[in-house]
Amino acid sequence: MQDEIQVHDKIFVPYLTQEEIESAVKKVAEKINSDYANECPLFIAILNGSFMFAAELFKHIRLSSEICFIKLASYKGTTSSGHVITSIGLDTDVISKHVIILEDILDTGRTLSRFLPQIEHQQPKSLKIAALLHKPEATVHEVPLDYNCFKIPNKFVIGYGLDYNGLGRNIPSVYQLKED
Ligand code: XMP
Ligand code: MG
């Protein structure tokens, strides 16, 4: 793992190694394997950030299960509630399925708090959330996080699918923004 890396104009320092991440993701996968024994869950991975987490986790899932990848688009709605979130690519029926949402990072919780009611509206049998990273200090919207690999401080991170202005997703470990 390189000591420091530059992405665009910012310097990042190592935070989580690939080994730490892979072992934590495997543990979460094993917990899901035992929690959903004899069930056939549907994983819904939220792009772009979760693609690496989803791939790593899914390799360790021993259940008969489905996965789909969606994008969330946020736009200003005409209602008083302001921003509306729509999902693109949810081409699988959710009704009566055990759904597990896969997110790269739970930050303020705003995205998921808006998206979850839409999934609930489609009447899944159950709905749980798995996030690779969680910034508890930043979370202002209550989101029940059922599976989490790491709690991290409220600092910007990149790597393992996460980006800074489009770059850094291919780094196999997680780097944190360097303090000035
Ligand atoms: P909320 O605030 O809705 O945010 O929970 C979730 C989404 O925000 C992005 N995000 C980050 N992306 N480094 C990133 O590369 C970060 O430190 C970070 N914090 C939030 C991310 O897309 C996540 O899905
Ligand atoms: Mg994301």
Image: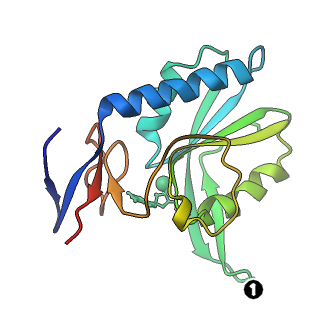
**Residue 34, x across and y down, in percent:** 69, 18
**Residue 163, x across and y down, in percent:** 33, 55
Q: Quadrant of residue 86?
A: bottom right
**Residue 148, x across and y down, in percent:** 57, 41
Which residue is at the front of the view, 150 or 119? Answer: 150
Determine which residue is flagged by label 1. 80
Q: Going 86% across and 44% down the picture, which residue do you hit? A: 123
Q: Going 53% across and 25% down the picture, which residue do you hit? A: 27
Q: Going 21% across and 57% down the picture, which residue do you hit? A: 12
Secondary structure at numbered mark 1: loop
Q: Is residue 27 above or below residue 158?
A: above
Which residue is at the front of the view, 69 or 137? Answer: 137
Q: Amino acid at mark 1?
A: Ser
Q: Quadrant of residue 28?
A: top right
Q: Residues within 10 Å of mark 1 (few under 14, many from 20)?
A: few
Q: Going 57% across and 25% down the picture, which residue do you hit? A: 29
**Image color mode:** rainbow
Q: Quadrant of residue 115?
A: bottom right
